[in-house]
């Protein structure tokens, strides 16, 4: 008899077995014994009942838009033929996309942006901040984490406007005005003009780091103090404690943040749109999601190419799905969320 | 018991509110005489006056509500939608005189969103059956909206409204697609070359040379090449900082098209197909590349940031720049109001047509992109929409709007109308219209424009040479438009 664990194989009891023919404590009546089929049916219904709301959300906000996107990508829907939205043109949009001269550059940019921001900030800086702020007095740690949350609390337009004012070329940007020759900048043109990628990654990273920081902090705080005390008694250095105790014990949050933030960065474009609009010059900081947005919505002279934008988007969705499955397999998520083995103790 | 009553109280209130909303929604076509009051805020120079418009509906009549959507920079362009409101009185008087029992009222939605968002909003609203009856938008949208059929073909109805006979003839071509008219011109502007008089004086120019510059620009004597030489001289003399000799606008827009026209490029052939003239485009790319090479413009100039751009030109850091006539009103109102507003601008800033490109057509040029009132094809009241538009197309209303917003006349009658002729900026800007050109109304122009501008961006940022830029743009156009563009 199991008394703990997830619903499995018809078992919907968390506290007592259903199939026992014992009197009900509350009513005193003897409950009739249910057939195995009935139990399984009830368990299935209960499981789907719990999953229902989440499934409905996934269906409405992911599956249905995904299917619509796929259908759209086989049409030529644009502002110019709104009266004939479903005219089928086969794989023309896909062939246009893959023969686009800048497709390889945009793809390279996307992976560069996603993995540089992820490794340096969303994982690296986040972990560093979590480790540092959990190793200082509690109030001070809380204060510094709050400071790092500020970029996330600031509306994106305001946040980017502030950065633009800092990073503009001399004489408009504060930084370039104050330090025109600092850090190898020539002519007061560091950041937005001279090294736009640094700027894009910094601005996104400062926001992205706070999410991992919060998750890692709570994970680090939940490590049993006994383990750390025992390690210290054994003479382990701070570095050994971090490397051999803390990091292995927060493996799950690390993998979760890697997966979540990869997918999040892959589809994020609003900060780049506001900061550089994919420039300066020739698709210098253009990422895939931004191209999809521009194709579908941002044409100056008014011809929104909905279908072509959908084609860029559906390819992105496919890449994201492949990456998500890859992460799940690579990091063996099933093992991480397996049933507790408490009854084996 | 009391607790129970309280529990039902919110429900009761909700029910009453719902009933009131439902009653309000179902109203509108009642047979009784109704008086509707519409309040219009009319910005003046110092005060905002309020106009009240009363609509009296006869007992057997019907009150039709039209929704008008305008993109306008507040407060200077508020007249764009407000003039429609102010046309309501005359529209109803005309209906009454014609024995028509219908009456019309106008509800406006007016703000200043991004052009792309505005376009998308109208398209999605049209698809959802919620389109406004009237939309004011740049005439280039006629290329796509006319082709898709979401705006009404007005050609056969325009003749019913004598007010439209007053519209300057050449402006009608901006509302046409395949020979049919899809809009009514709402405003017109010019895109001049602006120059700083004080900086030219500092460079050593005599006062009479500065004063005669507009005339020398119009005659073609002072060319684009002369302008670049002067700008380079100013940079070398330290009158302006490197990169501040000449500025075009900071992102894609109609201005870059007159670069192409000035270089001898054509954009539409007789059949209405788009043309990409490689020689003209290369000349444009060489011009902008030359400006960067000579330190007249920095390689990050096309950064899309209007804020620093306005500060640079309005506050006197830049010697020459290309901009719109309406931006004069913006600078006076928003950037130099503390320095004296328009007076300060007249003292320090001059303007004339875009100089002739000696290596191109060798004639001065400018470009006009009239906004147009268009009517949704989904509306059941095209005639009423046109009636209201016709009553907003008057000498008085258009003059007030033009003077407030830095725009130019759209009506022949404004040429003799004292409030217009006495407006210094409008009267000095008007001769520039002699050199005007338009953007084409074509469903494919958007892709053409984006590809062409990409070449400009690539050369300015130093990533491609002009020759390479042409090759890349041809490749993009081929991929984007295929047979819908003629490369020559």
Image: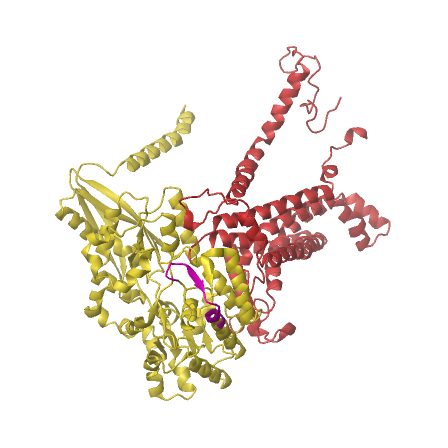
Chain colours: A red, B yellow
Q: Nearer the viewer, residue B323 or A185?
A: B323
Q: Evaluate whether residue A300 shows in this view.
A: no
Instruction: Classify residue A38 by image quadrant.
Output: top right
Q: Quadrant of the N terminus of chain B?
A: top left
Q: Nearer the viewer, residue A2 or B27?
A: B27
Q: Could you say where residue B7 lies in the image, as x and y percent from the top left?
A: 42, 28
B318 lies left or right of A267: left
Answer whether residue B278 is magenta in the image: yes
Is residue B55 placed above or below B402 in the rendered structure? above
Q: Nearer the viewer, residue B416 or A271?
A: B416
B439 lies left or right of A335: left
Number of marks in picture: 0
Which residue is farthest right? A234
Q: Could you say where residue A139 lies in the image, as x and y percent from the top left?
A: 65, 52
Instruction: Classify residue B336 by image quadrant.
Output: bottom left
Instruction: Classify residue B207 by image quadrant.
Output: bottom left
Is residue B270 placed above or below A175 in the rendered structure? above
Q: Nearer the viewer, residue A262 or A129?
A: A262
B447 lies left or right of B339: right
The boundaries of the magenta stretch are B269-282
Residue at image location 49% in from the left, 43% down from the top: A88
Residue at image location 50% in from the left, 55% down from the top: A294
Q: Evaluate whether residue B73 shows in this view.
A: yes
Residue at image location 34% in from the left, 76% down from the top: B352
Answer whether residue A270 is magenta in the image: no
Q: Could you say where residue A234 lies in the image, as x and y percent from the top left?
A: 86, 49
Is residue B389 placed above or below A165 in the rendered structure? above
Q: Could you say where residue B262 lies in the image, as x and y percent from the top left?
A: 41, 72
Residue at image location 66% in from the left, 20% down from the top: A40
């Amino acid at each position: 008899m199991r008394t703990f664990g997830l619903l499995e194989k018809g078992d919907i009891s968390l506290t007592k077995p259903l199939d026992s023919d014992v009197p009900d404590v509350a009513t005193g009546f003897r409950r009739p014994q249910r057939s195995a089929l009935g139990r399984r049916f009830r368990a299935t219904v209960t499981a789907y009942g719990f999953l229902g709301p989440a499934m409905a959300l996934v269906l409405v906000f992911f599956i249905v838009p995904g299917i619509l996107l796929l259908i759209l990508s086989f049409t030529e829907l644009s502002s110019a033929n709104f009266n004939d939205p479903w005219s089928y043109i086969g794989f023309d949009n896909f062939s246009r996309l893959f023969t686009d001269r800048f497709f390889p550059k945009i793809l390279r940019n996307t992976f560069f942006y996603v993995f540089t921001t992820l490794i340096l900030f969303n994982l690296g800086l986040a972990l560093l901040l979590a480790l540092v702020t959990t190793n200082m007095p509690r109030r001070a740690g809380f204060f510094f984490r709050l400071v790092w949350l500020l970029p996330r609390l600031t509306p994106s337009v305001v946040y980017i406007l502030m950065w633009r004012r800092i990073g503009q070329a001399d004489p408009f940007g504060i930084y370039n005005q104050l330090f025109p020759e600092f850090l190898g900048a020539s002519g007061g043109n560091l950041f937005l003009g001279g090294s736009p990628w640094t700027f894009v990654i910094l601005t996104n990273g400062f926001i992205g780091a706070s999410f991992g920081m919060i998750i890692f902090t709570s994970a680090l705080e939940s490590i049993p103090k006994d383990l750390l005390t025992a390690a210290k008694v054994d003479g382990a250095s701070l570095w050994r404690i971090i490397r051999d105790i803390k990091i292995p014990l927060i493996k799950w949050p690390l993998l979760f943040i890697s997966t979540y933030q990869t997918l999040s960065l892959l589809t994020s474009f609003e900060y780049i749109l506001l900061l550089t609009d994919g420039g300066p010059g020739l698709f210098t900081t253009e990422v895939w999601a931004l191209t999809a947005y521009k194709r579908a919505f941002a044409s100056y002279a008014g011809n929104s190419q909905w279908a072509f934008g959908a084609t860029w988007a559906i390819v992105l969705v496919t890449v994201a799905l492949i990456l998500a499955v890859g992460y799940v397999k690579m990091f063996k998520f099933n093992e991480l969320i397996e049933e507790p083995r408490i009854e084996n103790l | 018991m009391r607790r129970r009553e309280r529990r039902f109280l919110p429900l009761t209130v909700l029910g009453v509110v719902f009933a009131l909303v439902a009653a309000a929604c179902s109203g509108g076509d009642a047979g009784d005489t109704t008086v509707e009051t519409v309040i219009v805020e009319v910005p003046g120079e110092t005060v905002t006056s309020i106009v009240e418009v009363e609509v009296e509906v006869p007992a057997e009549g019907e009150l039709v509500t039209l929704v008008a959507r305008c993109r306008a920079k507040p407060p200077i362009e508020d007249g764009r939608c407000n003039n429609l409101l102010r046309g309501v009185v005359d529209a109803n008087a005309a209906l009454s005189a014609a024995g028509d029992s219908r009456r019309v009222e106008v509800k406006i939605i007016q703000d200043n969103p991004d052009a792309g968002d505005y376009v998308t909003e109208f398209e999605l609203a049209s698809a959802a059956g919620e389109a406004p009856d009237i939309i004011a938008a740049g005439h280039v949208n006629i290329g796509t909206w006319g082709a898709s059929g979401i705006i009404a073909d007005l050609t056969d109805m325009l003749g019913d409204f004598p007010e439209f006979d007053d519209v300057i003839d050449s402006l009608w071509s901006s509302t046409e697609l395949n020979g049919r008219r899809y809009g009514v011109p709402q405003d017109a502007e010019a895109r001049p070359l602006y120059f700083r008089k004080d900086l030219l004086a500092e460079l050593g120019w005599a006062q009479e040379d500065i004063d005669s510059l507009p005339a020398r620009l119009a005659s073609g004597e002072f060319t684009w090449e002369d302008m670049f030489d002067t700008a380079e001289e100013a940079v070398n003399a330290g009158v302006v900082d490197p990169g501040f000799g000449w500025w075009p606008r900071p992102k894609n827009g109609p201005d870059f098209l007159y670069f192409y026209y000035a270089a001898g490029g054509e954009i539409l052939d007789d059949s209405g197909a788009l043309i990409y003239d490689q020689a003209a485009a290369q000349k444009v790319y060489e011009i902008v590349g030359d400006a960067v090479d000579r330190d007249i413009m920095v390689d990050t100039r096309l950064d899309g940031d209007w804020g620093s751009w306005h500060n640079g030109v309005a506050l006197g850091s830049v010697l020459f720049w290309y901009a719109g006539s309406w931006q004069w009103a913006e600078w006076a109102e928003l950037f130099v109001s503390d320095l004296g507003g328009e007076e300060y601008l007249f003292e320090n800033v001059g303007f004339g047509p875009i100089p002739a490109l000696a290596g191109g057509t060798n004639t001065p040029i400018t470009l006009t992109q009239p906004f147009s009132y268009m009517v949704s094809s989904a509306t059941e009241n095209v005639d009423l929409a046109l009636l209201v538009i016709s009553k907003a197309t008057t000498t008085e209303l258009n003059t007030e709007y033009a003077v407030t917003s830095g725009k130019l006349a759209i009506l022949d009658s404004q040429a003799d109308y004292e409030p217009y002729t006495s407006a210094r900026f409008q009267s000095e800007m008007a001769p520039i219209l002699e050199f005007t050109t338009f953007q084409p109304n074509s469903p494919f122009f958007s892709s053409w424009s984006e590809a062409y501008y990409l070449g400009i961006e690539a050369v300015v940022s130093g990533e491609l040479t002009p020759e390479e830029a042409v090759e890349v743009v041809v490749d993009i156009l081929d991929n984007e438009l295929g047979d819908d563009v003629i490369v020559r």
